[in-house]
Amino acid sequence: MKKTLLFAAALTMLLASCDKNDDTKKALDADFKLETVQTLVYGEPVALTGSITSSAAITKAVFTGAKKAADGSYSVVGEAQDGTVTGTTATAEFFADSKEINAIEVVLSNGSASKTFYFDAPKVSGEPKGDVYFNDSAVLYPDNKVENHENSPEKYPEEFTGAGSDTKSFFSMHGVEVNGKVEHILSLNELLAVDGKNASFCFLNVLENTAKNVTLGSQRGYMYSGMKGTSLGGGTTGRQCDIYKYGDHQIKDENVDINFTMKYVRGSWAGESYHPELFTAVDNIFVSLKKAETNLEKIKAFYALGEIQRKLDNSTLGVTEEPTSLGGKTYIRKWVGAGNGKGLEEVQRAGDYIIIRSERQAEGEETPRYYYGLIQVMMFEYDDAQTFVENEGLRFIDPEKAKDLFMKPVYLDIKTQCEIAE
């Protein structure tokens, strides 16, 4: 009797399960009409709108790029993109994420019931404009002086020899191939191997002319410096050891990201130097960038970062009526005047942003291409206030105490456009 009851219970559960499976396969009683799609440009959004006729309320609409074959069948070639359902209207900000797209798949659903529709679309025009690089835990170290024949001839008597360095002090917006992988956080040795290719900036501690072993006067402390020889080897930067020739290799101006600039965007702590509209605009872009792992996520991130150009730097797009111009420098200091205290000003704190821009123009191109990115300063490991002293009413960084800043990292959250790796 017990076995009979158990069998009956099992049969009941199996039948219930079958009924449930039948429900999930039930087609939705609905119709959908998509407004004509005029153009699709790779990597750019287009507004899609369609009207719904259904016996049940539609709770979800998913739009996906599809390909129509010669026999009239359809296959999905893009990633699913959620739309918005408002009453009997479904809309989507749709990104063409495949060159194969010539149709749009729309799936409407209500609970477990769904119905799929296909609509012809124009062929996707345009080409991929670039890639993105995200690193929410980037770490850069201000390197000690790199010893070489020029500054330490007793250790390196032969010309063009030196210790080199594996310290991660450099950032490349577009990346450098290292051991078969594209890297953006680099050491001097890694950059020397490619003669400085794509190097964008160096994070350093300003203290001395590393060729002459002479302490610098007016400037001191943390600094982000562009990679031109005149920037790194400048009189108020002092990283001559980084542009020294080691063996057959040297960081060369013709190889670095030569037209790379930076603009700092300070938070409310800066008082009158705080520009809330600019900070809010940058912060909104940065916060909106969540992930960049799939092709679609990268496309959306690249477009979102392009808002910097479209809103803050549209003169580069040829806008002539009330154009915006971002500006920028080849260096940013944490402090200005920290070497002698004259005109001392704090420039940057944790929480601030740096807008980065790279201008690229290959031979034969009529107009340059611009790439944009955002860096948020998360934390300086060392409190540089401990290196300050006062003398005759002036506050400045003491040269001896400044040595404590070497190898004390800055932590950055980086989200940037970049070129597609070759």
Image: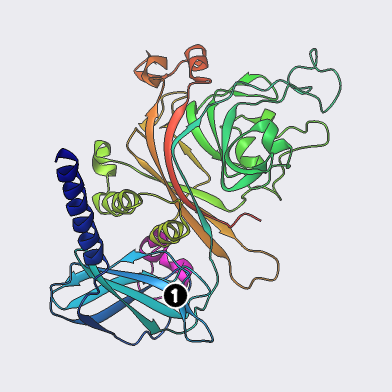
Q: Could you tell me which residue is drawn at 71 percent across and 25 percent down?
A: 164
For this view, does 37 lie left or right of residue 77?
left
Question: In the rendered view of the protein, which quadrant contains the C terminus?
Answer: bottom right
Mark 1, residue position: 66
Name the residue at 34% across, 33% down. Answer: 350
Looking at the image, is 243 positioned above or below residue 130?
above
Which residue is found at the position 21% from the left and 52% from the top?
11
* Of the pair 66 and 110, the residue shown nearer to us: 110
Q: Seen in the image, is 419 located left or right of residue 381? A: right
Q: Residue 121 location, x and y as percent?
A: 42, 84
Magenta span: 305-325
When asked about the image quadrant of residue 61, the answer is bottom left
Q: Position of residue 7 (x, y in %)?
A: 20, 47
Say which amino acid is labelled 1: Ala
Residue 160: tell me if it is visible.
yes
Does residue 206 lie above or below 185 as drawn? above
Question: Where's the N terminus, which quadrant?
Answer: top left
Q: For the point 46% across and 70% down, which residue is it?
A: 317
Observer-nearest residue: 406 or 95? 95
Q: Residues within 10 Å of mark 1 (few under 14, many from 20)?
A: many
Identity of the residue furthest to the front in this view: 1
Horizontal relation, residue 219 to residue 46: left or right: right
Q: Is residue 168 magenta?
A: no
Q: Secondary structure at mark 1?
A: strand
Q: Quadrant of residue 162?
A: top right
